[in-house]
Amino acid sequence: MKDRELQRRIERAVDEGLSCLEPTEAQCAQIARRAMAEKRARGVRMPAALVLALIMLALTMSAAAAAALLSLRQMVEQQAVPLANQTQDESYTAEDTEWLIRLAEENGITLSQRTMEQISFELSKGKGYFKEELLMALAKAEFGPDPSAWTLEEQSWFDGVCAAIGFLPEKEKAVPEGGEGAKDPVLQAAEAYIHARYGQDVPLNDPEKYKTGVQYINGDADGAFPGMYWSVAYYPQYLEGGEYWVYVNDAFQVLGEETRPGLQADAGILEVRNHYRSLYSWNPGWWSQEVVQSFQKRALMAKDTWQKAYCALARTTYPDIDPQAVSPQAAEDAALEYLHMTPREYEPRVLRMGAVYIGSDQGPVWKILLQSDNNNWLAEVDAMTGSVLRARQQPPGVSWHEWYQWYYILVLDSTLEEVENTWVDQAPPTLESYG
């Protein structure tokens, strides 16, 4: 084939499919150099127009390769699900977990930092990650971190994925006729029911007070109700708000309800803790300083003042974080170095469980919890200098539940020791005893 005819065909292909591509100067120079090198090697005269056409063709091939990236759904359906079905275990193998993480990264799917830490933690033990949890993490990367806010179609798709790997015996969620628009009359029926039963002042439509989740479910599959039905959940975003679930059929009749009251004035300290966990995070080490301050204030209104947690919190202060203080991440790094672990050694096998900023007579302190498979530590770091003040390890032969209590990360070890030393069983202290 003559050079000019070849040139015309390439130019035609470029004109038809690649008119939107504009190569950078660096890309043009690189491909031109390759083309000229090929010319010199073969002793063939290559017109400048043909060189440009080849440049555009090469760019097209690169664009086509980029376009071949897997979408989240393609990756899950074509790769993650078949891998999950190769074994009966609840977890992927370590090798499959690592491969799926690499595949996600190569396809631009970014998992949360906390998920990656948890996956690294499991891999460090030679174990893979739980199948359903990894698939959920991938779905959250695409649809958003809150599954209750996913569209009905997204919920149905993920439900099908769970059924495909055997996590569910059969698919339960579906998309109704009318799609997302079918939710509107259902929400109206659920709201009317709650307002009639619990009062018109329940602020269900205030997004700062309530978050709404809607699911369309096959009751014959989940066994709750016959036929298709709707589950409408109202999640409170404030402590005093009640939590509501209302179940509605396609005729907009309420089939049932479940409720959890909001935080009551006479709540015990564990009830206060549970509400804060539900609203913010199960781990106090991940709460903001404002939430910690609010929690202490509300916890000290609890009725069960004889609880050790109450006594410890009452002896603790939570000042505003000094702008000059080291970051909690820097404090965690200092604690890990103090425990003679280099980053490469500790990152894969230690979970950072957060830090709490606590006041003391000597200055503010970051209280830190670090967890691993066999060893767990509580550390205290000077919040202004970053130096480690104290670190203690879970004793050998002592279980986690024997060694650690939920409030330990919220108070200094010296306060815990003071509470233990002054503790008298079944003798509730008076408020005056806290000073």
Image (spheres, rainbow, N blue to C red):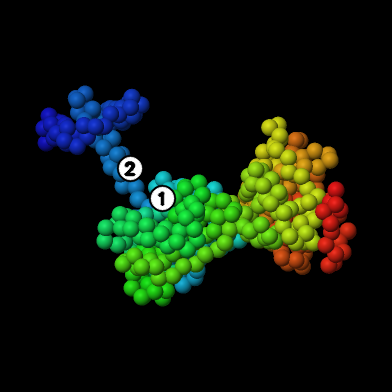
Q: Is residue 226 visible?
A: yes
Residue at 50%, 46% in the rendered image:
208
Q: Between disc 2 and disc 1, whose residue precedes? A: 2
The front one of 204 and 43 is: 204
The front one of 243 and 159 is: 243
> 220 above or below 305?
below
Tell me the kind of residue under disc 2: Ala
> 433 above or below 38?
below
Q: How many marks?
A: 2
Left or right for 191, reference 293: left
**Percent x, y for residue 301?**
72, 54
Left or right for 284, reference 176: right
Q: Give the label, 2 or 1, closer to the camera.
A: 1
Residue at 79%, 54% in the rendered image:
312
Mark 2 secondary-structure assignment = helix
Left or right for 434, reference 148: right
Quarter location, residue 248: bottom left
Q: Residues within 10 Å of mark 2 (few under 14, many from 20)?
A: few
Q: Give the residue number, with chain letter if any, for mark 2.
A: 66
In the rendered image, the quadrant that contains the N terminus is: top left
**Percent x, y for residue 423?**
86, 61
Residue at 30%, 62% in the rendered image:
176
**Percent x, y for residue 128?**
53, 62
Q: Give the residue number, with chain letter if any, for mark 1.
A: 142
Q: Is residue 78 visible?
A: no
**Percent x, y for residue 368?**
71, 49
Tell me the kind of residue under disc 1: Glu
Residue at 30%, 29% in the rendered image:
23
Mark 1 secondary-structure assignment = helix
